[in-house]
Amino acid sequence: MTEILIKARNVQKSFGTHHVLKGIDLDITKGEVLAIIGPSGSGKSTFLRCMNFLEEYDHGEIWFGTELVGYRKAANGSLVKDKASRIAAIRTRMGMVFQNFNLFPHMSVLENVIEGPTVVQRRDRAEVIAQAKVLLDRVGLAAKVDDYPETLSGGQQQRAAIARALAMNPELMLFDEPTSALDPELVGEVLDVMRSLAADGMTMAVVTHEMGFAREVADRVMMMDDGNRVEIDTPERIFTNPSHPRTAEFLQRVL
Ligand code: ADP
Ligand code: MG
């Protein structure tokens, strides 16, 4: 049976009078890799951030497993914003990787990776350090554990950020253009780490402009435009036979 990890229904979001998400529906099944593509300003980041409630959606529902993200249902059926502690608890179950790495600059690579598990999850420090070293080895940073972010290349920083997210043992990984800030020669090493995560069965939602990666690694590709889900399909269909002219037009521009 396919288990649905994320279920989004009619998700809408406005910034002031600007209607940025116009009713997004999406299911992400466990183990699936979803690539989200579309022009700049189409709402990709906003939607991704709604999944872990870094951005508050203002209409519709997002379910993470059996949990409604960010809200609880009042007796009359209306949605009421949830307690901060519950929002934080749901958020720790999703790892997020940002375009600009967002490592803590005053902490070594190892300290960056163990911070969340020891402080937020209050797990045993020795056990967390052991896991962190395995993760850092896995992303190719075994030799960099004691180094500070500013001494690392962008590719190394992003790999450290991925290890940091994985250290929380997330059930879902959200990536927002993880390679867009990298020099071209460093993109591959980050995509390789993501490819290996996908092969291991991690559930992933990846906003990306790397069409090669989307085509090769994603199970499905969602095309967004102007706050709408234009279409969602296999990479094969999206890249060779898109059903929507907006997708064809977008791909023509970026490929
Ligand atoms: P994408 O990631 O597809 O480039 P975004 O989700 O970042 O698009 O943005 C969608 C639209 O929402 C853009 O027009 C953007 O300017 C606007 N927007 C995003 N974040 C904010 C914010 N915090 N305040 C006001 N407008 C925002
Ligand atoms: Mg964005």
Image (tube, rainbow, N blue to C red):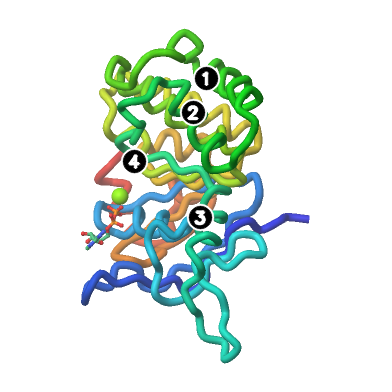
- Residue 68 falls in image quadrant: bottom right
Question: Image quadrant for the N terminus?
Answer: bottom right
Ligand 2: does it lie within 8 Å of the C-beta at label 1?
no
Q: Is residue 101 left or right of residue 66?
A: left
Q: Which residue is mark 4?
A: 209
User: Helix, strand, or loop for circle 2?
Assistant: helix
User: Helix, strand, or loop for circle 4?
Assistant: loop
The single residue placed furthest to the right in the displayed view is: 1
Residue type at mark 3: give it: Ala
Residue 113 circle label: 2
Q: Which residue is mark 3?
A: 88
Density class for disc 2 (Cα within 10 Å; few <14, some 14-19, many ≥20) is: many
Q: Could you give the CA–CA distance between mark 3 and mark 4, rounded to whole angstroms? A: 29 Å
Residue type at mark 2: give it: Val
**Badge nearest the viewer, 3 or 4:** 3
Badge 1 or badge 2: first in the primary sequence = 2
Badge 2 or badge 3: first in the primary sequence = 3
Q: Could you give the CA–CA distance between mark 2 and mark 3, rounded to whole angstroms? A: 18 Å
User: Helix, strand, or loop for circle 1?
Assistant: helix
